[in-house]
Image (spheres, coloured by chain):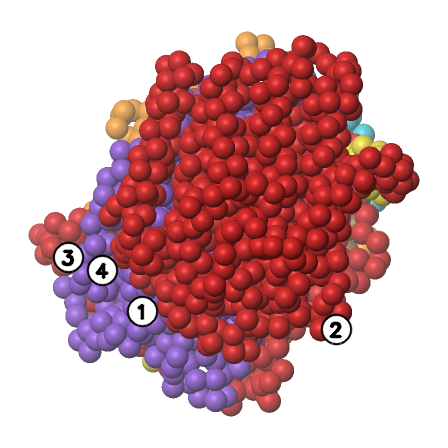
Amino acid sequence: MLDNVIMLVFAMISIALLLNLWRLLRGPSLPDRILALDTMYINSIALIILYGLLMGSPLYFEAALLIAMLGFVSTVAVCKFLLRGDIIE
Amino acid sequence: MQHWMEWAIAFFLLLGGSFVLIGSIGLTRMPDFFMRLHGPTKATTLGMGGILLGSIFFFSLTGDVSIHELLITIFLLITAPISAHMLIKTALHHKLTAISKTRGLDKIPPAQVKAHDRNV
Amino acid sequence: METLFASCIGFLTFCGIFLMLRGRTFPVMLGLTMLSYAVNLFIFASGRLTLRGAAVLGTSEQYADPLPQALVLTAIVIGFAMTAFLVILAIRARADLGNDHVDGKLPDADGMKRESR
Amino acid sequence: MRFDAKYRWLPTPYRSVMLFVVWLLLNQSIEAVHLFFGVVLALLIPLLIQRFRDPQPVIERPLLALRYMLRVLADIVVANAQVAVLILGPKRRLNPAFVKVPLDLQHELPITILASTVSMTPGTVSAEVLPSTESIKPGEPLPQRWLLIHVLNLTDEATLIDSIKQRYEAPLKEIFNAG
Amino acid sequence: MTLMWILLLPLLGTMVPLLAGKGSRTTCAFATGVAPALALVLLLLQAPEVFSGETLRFFVSWIPLLGLDITITLDGLAFLFSLLILGIGLLIIVYARYYLSERDSMPRFFAYLMLFMTAMLGIVLSGNLLQLWLFWELTSISSFLLISFWWHKAEARRGARMALTVTGAGGLALLAAFLMIGDIVGSYDLQQVLASADQIRQHSHYPILLVLFLLGCFTKSAQFPFHFWLPNAMAAPTPVSAYLHSATMVKAGIFLLARFYPALSGTELWFVLVSVAGLATLLIGSYLALFKHDLKGLLAYSTISHLGLITLLFGMGTDLAAVAGLFHIINHATFKASLFMAAGIIDHESGSRDMRKLNGLWQFMPITATLAMVAAAAMAGVPLLNGFLSKEMFFAETLHQHLLGSLSWVIPVLATIAAIFSVAYSTRFIHDVFFNGQPKGLSKTPHEPPRYMRVPVEILVALCILVGIFPSYMIGDLLHAASVAVLAGNVPQYSLAIWHGFNLPLLMSVLAVSGGVLIYINRKHLFDFQNTLPDVDALNSFERGIKQFAARCHRFYQWLDNGSLQRYMTLVLLSFVLLAGLPLIHLTTLWGGREELPIDAVNGAGAALLLIGAFATVMWHRKRVVALLMISVVGLMVSIAFTRFSAPDLALTQLSVEVVTIILLMLALFFLPHKTPKQSESSRVVRDLSIASMVGVVVGSLSYALMTRPFNTISDFFLTNAKTGGGGTNVVNVILVDFRGFDTLGEITVLGIASLGIFKLLTRIPLFKPSSDGEGRPWALERHSLLLATVSQSLLPLAIMVSIYIFFRGHNLPGGGFIAGLVTAVAIILQYIAHGVDWVKERMNVEYQRVVAIGLMIALFTGAASWLFGRPFLTSWFDYFDIPVLGKIELASAIAFDLGVYITVVGSTLLILANLGKMTTAHRPVHKETI
Amino acid sequence: MISSAVQLVLVVILLLHVQQNGLLHYAIGNWQAPFGIILVADTLSMVLVCLTSFLALGAICYGSAGEDEKGSFFHPLFQFQVMGINGAFLTGDLFNLFVFFEVLLIASYALLIHAGGKNKTKAAVHYVVLNLTGSAIFLFSLAVLYGTLGTLNIVDMAQKVAVLPAEDLMLVKSGGLMLMIVFALKAAVLPLQFWLPATYSSASAPVAALFAVMTKIGIYALLRVYTTIFGADAGPLQGMAADWLLPAGLATIVLGAIGVISSHDFRKLVANLVLVSVGTLVAMVALHTELSAAAALYYTVHSTLVTAALFLIADLISNQRGKAADRLVSGRRVVQPILLGSLFMLAAMAVAGLPPLSGFIGKLMLLQAVTEPANRALLWAVILMCSLLVIVGLSRAGSTLFWRVSGGDASGDKAAPLQVFAVCWLLLASPLLVIFAGPLTELSQQAAAQLYDTDTAARAILGSAATEGDVP
Ligand code: NA
Ligand code: NA
């Protein structure tokens, strides 16, 4: 049963990712796109965790953790870029 | 693995998945940027929490105790509001239009810009 | 799966190359980044695709080929160094030459009017 | 409210505790080796990067802080359910709004916690802290500050402001023993 | 060894003038003369042996692989030429002492001259073909230097270049010919070559070989149609003209004809080529000489004609003709050298060489005039002078040849005509200069030259007379010995008597003299006629030709290399498609037999995201910020692909690198336009699309073909030995830090160097900071968000904790120094973003380049530490220790190595990003774009 | 500078050792081939390493006379570059070769922009982008070769190629030919040579001098790969590069010669001379015989040192001619006409292949190495005619630079003694190469023989592979 549930959640996440992509492509504004990308980062964490579950392996945890950290930094950086142009000033 | 445990895991996963999905639906569905922001910021965070809890249970039951997924949750809890804050700042800076029925637009500070940046 | 994977590599290569053939430094950098993705996936694929086989001893029955992975890691790092250099070089070129064309001068068509930003 | 730590070698005790826990979480073990290194790192890292931290008010009421955390967690769950309904429900019924919440808190850390909390809880996202810190010249008296928030579905502005101030700002003031 | 000294002495002599340059001019000349004089003595000492028909040889092995050895051969022919070279050379040295003015650098001149002398001697003494060629080219070079001695004159420079070009071309042809000969014979030894005459002549390549050989000879000896360089080489100082362009260098080609006469002559082709070239040169030279108003010009064309005469003799193919040729070589050298010197004296003492100005010099310089007249008479072939004798022999030979079958009578007729002109121009030389009224418009009053300047002329003229009167006594032995060498011993009967009775040749001589005088008297008509002909200025047209050629080359080069990177890239990529793609066409099926993995929906979704992201990047590449966001999607999906296909390390690395790259690109974008103007025409887009798709197809196919093939790899070794030999369970990491640690060392070196390079790029960069973004929006006022600043401060310890964790587990689980380094770096960058450079600098004032260096050193020393244990570089070490309370702990050298990696990565990344960020801080507020 | 000198001494000792005792190999990390990375020192690679060290010493002397202070990190970058070059010569592992390529490339990027200037930046953009493309292709090809042969060690690859299943043949060929693009790009072979003239002519003099050996790495790699991996045992893949390399090499010679005659400034001219030498070498590689390899080696040594010297001379001239710099127009008189003139003359003679300097021996060797009649006519014609063009171009350039004097008096910096020494050091090699041509040509031949004797190398390198997993 659990495998089926995992697959179902996989499907949900995949749909979520595609929705994010849609927003990313659609825009219309840059903040919209950044938001979409940020969400995509977070949703991919879910995806990776699910992979881990599916394979019964804890090896993928770090990847998820890193996405969480790096996704944040890159979102912040892009915002800063749009606000100030200069990320590191 | 006990049956009820499996149910619990399934519950958390499904809960998480649903919230993740709802967050993304919000992202697509809401009419302006400010409203779109709410879904991902909140729903996704909780959704992630759900999935991570599912994962914690899963690994804790199959093998050693696995609670490091908590870290991701904590991390997201700390960062998500800041991301949202930075995004909304950017949106305000870009003068994105909110839908017309939004109230309190006057509370948004006037353009915080001068002709040239001379603050240093 | 292999078909899909190979198609992705091919498509990434296609996109990367197309961008690298543009006339401005920024698309070229994007193209290079994209091409690096393609290259990395390509090297990785040369060890064949394996599911559930991370090359960590004791975690599975059958392991993915670790050597291409190590090679990709090296390639990623080197690629990063090179990209970084190129990026800064592009800035320098813009500063020195006054435009961001890869040839250091705008093509004749609008070479007369200064690039406006 | 106080800023300085009790011990020089332990400038930020709560941070050290957090790091120690994080280390154990990361390693998922309470073996002697990990405990040992956890302690070492939890003591070492804060010392190492001590300078990378602007002085912040110290938590004076840890138990209250814990209670605050639990309350926020619970609120998050509720908030999510609410937002889910709003998102899935008809768009016509949403009444978005910008609201300015006057702030009693003055220091960065409490304000940040408040803003984060607000962002995580019912239908609101913190947008800005106004006026910006950089517009305040050093030495000048702090002006009244506001938290600009975006509300997904506003029913009553005064109630909202009041609930935020009561439910979150007040306990924070207590935790840090100041405004 | 004596032979060697003959060659070495002049070579050493090159140094002498340079060393003696400080002394007086006479000392310098005298000192210079010592070496050749000694060499001459040495040479003369060999005379008895040589005259007795012996060939002296000297051999030193040099480059056996090439067949190039030092072989010196002295036979009659070499003796004859050496004598000319050294003898006339000495006279020239004396002459040049007086000829050169104070302003000219005498040491330089003499050094060049000695160099030339050495080269010339080298040619004639060589017993090895390649060695001969070596000296051959050396004459070209030294003559280039001598002709251009007065480099401030344009005609000297051009003349020198022209001579170098023409003779250089010939030299290369000659080299080809020699190599072919060497290939046929199997040796470059002259003796062997000469002994293999039949082999050469019967070889299928003989015609090509001969043509190449003759190209070499004819260019050097100014044979038609390569004669044009010689008159223009007259821009050289007169001693040079006298030496090189009459007596020696131009004879080098003739020398070769004589030298290889036994090996190459005797075929129809030889006769036709050599004799026709000679005849044409003879005629043209003698005809044109008459019309030159410049004394040296006249002599130059005369030289051309005489060289033609000698060539014609060698082309006739009879033994007697060859002897006559040799004889004329000697005679021409003596009278022509003296004439050049006389011309030089006239030039030197009257300031002009123009025969229209020079008139009646007899009254001013009677002795010189007498000498010149005698020499000119010898040139004209007047009896009792040496020129007469060889010319008689020449006439006789023209009558005996049958080169042109029934038309062979043409040759003597043409020879007579040439002789007529020869007399005419000789007469002009005498009459126009020394008589014919008074000088016009000379800058100074002519007078006799210094005493010793005339001596060389006197000696040579005396020789002309002596040989003319006592030929066999004077040079009988010499000529015989030379003939023996040239004719391989089959010397015919010949007589050097002055009087052979009344015969046809004598009639021809009489005709020539009378005809010549007649023509000279009626020269006005001829001059008028000549003036109606278009004036061909060889020098200018040659120069123009070269210039046009160069210009055309330039245009071609510019056309090909238009400075467009896009073109270069296109070529690279097309090569790729061609070379990598062609073999695939021969592959019947891409599929290699391995079962494919199944595709599930999630993979499909991931692939879709990847593909759409990539496509969107391309679509929106002109909106740069958007493109940046799109490419992030691609990067993210690539990382996820790595996790999906069992490569967690790759995923981690890819993720961290990607974020850093994006940040970097954004930093860059600040200084670049935010939008790319639409510039490419659609044709270019189509072209690029097709190239890109071809490359994509090739790469994709290759990848597919690889993935579906079974294969064996060395990786099993790594899997088996990672734990036991490398002490880690994360095989990828063990490969990185142990099995292939050297790669990793290289890789972090690259990173370190890159950061140094970037530091370099950023120093003194003329930055401009835009004051608004792409849409013209001014930047936000607030620099740092309060919320972000506070949170990022709390994230820092967390991130460091995580990176330490990732660092330590790397050896056994996914992670490692590189990823940990990037995480740390990103955490610090977050501080930069949140607080700015100044804030961070206050708290951490580190020179990142030092950090990089430390990191590299740690890695390097870890590797080198294994030397202490007598192991090769980078040999790893690990062990397990039981520590009370804590338990078993693994310590491995790989951890130290990884620490080096970690530190390097942190240092480089920060060096790159923080420095770039710092740029703007220092420069604010500079808004105006100045560039 | 000292380190360069020490290095030179060391490598010469090592060269003599290798020459006497045969090939040496060094297993890094004590992991034997084909599993670990090994360094292989045979005569060929050692000669080239010696060459590099010799060159580096000259270039660094020149650089130490002030050029090094025109930007930061000159000396470290220089040493890194040398390290990369030497590593590329010595490594026995194809992927490690890639790594060293990158080391030397990144160092060269950084050195190229040393001392700054618009031209350098402009050239650097092209140079970097093209080389990055090249690196990508290198990686593609490595992956293809690994994916089919399952190994990375060069000698081991040769073993695997020899027993390659027929269905993988074309894949390996594709990978092998990709390598050719990479190496040809580094070597600057037509049509991949476009980066060279601008790059070499805009780099600082000592850097350009060091770069003179960089193209040779491409040549070396071509030689190594196509004699070892795709050598005599490679069956249908044997000599697969020759069909492409020969015409490409010849075309490069012609283009270089055209460039020499048409260049408007002297540094460009010298850069084109590099092209001529590259073309010549590539043609020699394409001939694929021991003789041609020997000729190529000798010629490599000669042409590298002489072109390097020319770059330095160009710089000296340019410093003394005021505004005209190294442009081939009439300009001021140089301050030291005799010194520079003689140096120029010597270098020009050497590079044009005129006796008695080393170019002539090199040329003789090359011409003699062409044994096949069909190739001979073509190669000889091209080489000899292009020699003529080179002579014409150089004589024009020289007479313009030194003799077409106009305008003011000589002014400008006199060459520093260290600079003069550097030039002499490099130029001195030319006569030495002639005087000791006997033993040196023999050495070249020996190196070539060793290169072609793949079996012995395989035995020496893989022989110890039987003791797999020999762990400390
Ligand atoms: Na909220
Ligand atoms: Na006259």
Chain red in the figure, letter: E
Do the dots labelled 1 and 2 sit on one chain?
Answer: no
**The residue under label 3 is which amino acid type?**
Arg
Q: Residues within 10 Å of mark 3 (few under 14, many from 20)?
A: some
Q: CA distance from mark 4 to mark 2?
A: 68 Å
Q: What residue is drawn where x is 72% and y is 19%?
A: E360
Do the dots labelled 4 and 3 sit on one chain?
Answer: no
How many marks can you see?
Answer: 4
Work out whether mark 3 precedes mark 2 in sequence or the reverse, and give the earlier one: 2
Chain cyan in the figure, letter: B
Q: Secondary structure at mark 4?
A: helix
Do the dots labelled 1 and 3 sit on one chain?
Answer: no
Q: Which mark is residue E406?
A: 2
In the image shown, does E901 or E92 lie closer to the viewer?
E92
Chain orange in the figure, letter: D
Rendered colour, chain F: purple
Q: Which mark is residue F19?
A: 4
- Report x, y in % for residue E565: 67, 50
- Chain under callout 4: F
Q: Which residue is mark 3?
A: E871
**The residue under label 2 is which amino acid type?**
Ser
Q: Residues within 10 Å of mark 1 (few under 14, many from 20)?
A: some
